[in-house]
Amino acid sequence: MRDVPVTGRAPAPDLARGAALLLIAVANAHTFVTHRGIGVRAYPLDPTGVDAWLAAAQLTLVDGRAYPLFALLFGYGIAGLARRAARDGAGPDQVLALVRRRGGALFAVGAAHAVLLWHGDFVAAYGLIAVVLAPVLVRGSTAVLVLTGVAATTLLALLYAPVALTRSDAASASPSLVAPDVLSAAVERFGEWLFGNLLVSALGLLGAAVAGVLVARAGWLDAPARHRRALRRVAVAGIGAGVVGGLPLGLVAAGVWVPSEPVALVVGVLHAVTGYAAGAGYAAAAALVVARGSATRPVAGALVALGRRSLSGYLAQSVVFVGLFPAWTLGLGAGLPLGAATLCGAGVWLLTVVAAVVSRQRGRRGPAARPGIGG
């Protein structure tokens, strides 16, 4: 399938998507580690040495920061889709129908991904948001979007408040990873996704998605050179807040700090809320790279190529992880050091970058690219 024309397509969101996939690969890889107990956000219980340092670093910079970044870019994409459709003559109801069709396609892809590969899918959650909240995302005023984002973020913070208290000797937080065969794993995975992940993910992504709509309306990612000052402020403040808010939970996960229960609840809330700030900061940093004219350089260009095929890149990560780690495939996740899982995640991401560059050179879209779905 030949690539669609991309003339005039803003490179900043694609650059951010390509980089975000590295964060997602690293954040997801540790969830496939089994038989090491379950600690904070599914990190191994009581890590030592390099694993302890990695857990602290990832919870500070990556975990709970990658998905808000991608959700912000999703909201930006929905706003751009609606804007282009209206510019091409579509009426208000037609625009809503288009957004809902896109959401339905994403939900179908995400559901298949969850049932066949990994219960932690978030594509279906995006689809659910687009189908149910299309009027808010497309027509909502700034006040409505802000109130929606604040409400969703508040609920998310309450849900994640106890995360610093997580301690279990279970083999895995996901029974599907330690299931003995393909069929039982699929049954477990379906339940984990439908009853444990889908709605929580949708709620967790909603706040950042509406922020992405606001960013699209402001034009920051479309013309970053015009908004350098604002983008610098967002990048510094957002990433700084993410570090300050993420480090306490990282220290808990590493076993360096054992807070009292009331303090631990505050740590969980702080980590969740500042993840949104970090996601916005990372998006602003990508836009600043583009504003400096660096998007055409080899590394940035490779990230843009992957960002334009982000759905394919995301699904490819799961294919490789599932082939390596669960008990019903090669079972390499059992007792795996966190460092090895992290290197595997980064390596898989690098392979998708290479594949995206080759695909671009051949004028092809990603394997998952279909009309109404994306690359």
Image (cartoon, grey):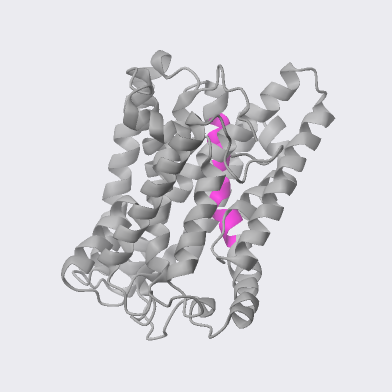
Q: Is residue 274 visible?
A: no
What residue appears at the point 61 percent right and 37 percent down from the top-left corner? 145
- Position of residue 33 relative to residue 214, above or below, is below
Quarter holding the N terminus? top right
Q: Is residue 20 visible?
A: yes
Q: Position of residue 161 (x, y in %)?
A: 43, 65
Q: Position of residue 337 (x, y in %)?
A: 27, 72
Residue 304 or residue 284, whichever sits in front: 304
Question: With 82 as the anchor, is 11 left or right in this view?
Answer: left
- What secondary structure prevails in the magenta region? helix
Quarter holding the C terminus? top right
Q: Which stretch did the figure color magenta?
A: 200-214
- Position of residue 227 relative to residue 29, above or below, is above
Q: Quadrant of residue 137?
A: top right
Q: Position of residue 218 (x, y in %)?
A: 53, 22
What residue appears at the point 31 percent right and 60 percent down from the top-left corner? 342
Q: Position of residue 260 (x, y in %)?
A: 28, 73
Magenta-colored stretch includes residue 206: yes
